[in-house]
Image (cartoon, helix red, strand yellow):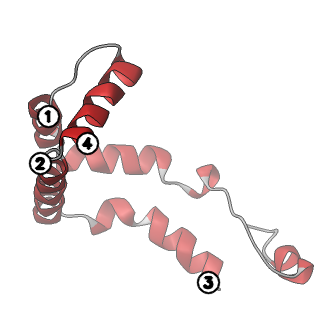
Amino acid sequence: ETIKVIFESISNLSNSLNADKLEEIKIQKINTLIRLNEDILDEAAMLGWGFVLYDRLVTLEEIIFQINQVTHNDIKTISKKYLVPQNSILVVLGPKDIADSVSSF
């Protein structure tokens, strides 16, 4: 039963996030990035990751701009494409009989 609820929750994620909640999440993420960027080592790490991932300097301002460009429709589209049971991988830790009982998922 728990597994079924988990899969149903994942399938409904795109419907559970409204535009107001998305804006709240974006503000939280931006504030976290700004706070982390106050430390010189964290700033250096962020700039380094820009080079590792994109082979160029990626500034905090660019990241904030990109976060602000994310729309509610973007989230719905991505959720419907990737957050589907067919893409799920289930890992069960416990006795073998538990694993056997969820093998149908």
For marks 3 and 2, the one nearer the N-term is 3
Residue at x 32% of width, y 26% of height: 48
Q: Position of residue 61 (x, y in %)?
A: 8, 32
**Secondary structure of residue under mark 1:** helix
How far apart are the two marked residues, 3 and 2, measured between alpha carbons? 38 Å
Compared to residue 5, the image places residue 31 above or below, namely: above
How far apart are the two marked residues, 1 and 3, measured between alpha carbons? 40 Å
Q: Nearer the viewer, mark 3 or mark 2?
A: 2
- Say what amino acid the circle numbered 3 marks: Thr
- In depth, the one of 104 and 69 nearer the eye is 69
Q: Which residue is mark 4?
A: 42
- Say what amino acid the circle numbered 1 marks: Leu
Q: Nearer the viewer, mark 4 or mark 3?
A: 4
Quarter placement of the N terminus: bottom right
Quarter placement of the C terminus: bottom right
Q: Which residue is mark 2?
A: 34
Q: Position of residue 20 (x, y in %)?
A: 10, 64
For marks 1 and 2, the one nearer the N-term is 2
Q: Is residue 43 left or right of residue 20?
A: right
Q: Position of residue 30 (x, y in %)?
A: 13, 50
Residue 65: which quarter of the image? top left
Q: Which residue is mark 1?
A: 60
For disc 1, the neighbor class at 10 Å (few under 14, some 14 to 19, many from 20) is: some
How far apart are the two marked residues, 4 and 2, measured between alpha carbons? 10 Å
Compared to residue 88, the image places residue 96 above or below, namely: below
Q: Which residue is mark 3?
A: 2
Q: Is residue 61 left or right of residue 87?
A: left
For disc 2, the neighbor class at 10 Å (few under 14, some 14 to 19, many from 20) is: some
Compared to residue 63, the image places residue 18 above or below, namely: below
- Say what amino acid the circle numbered 4 marks: Asp
Answer whether labels 4 and 3 touch (C-beta < 8 Å): no
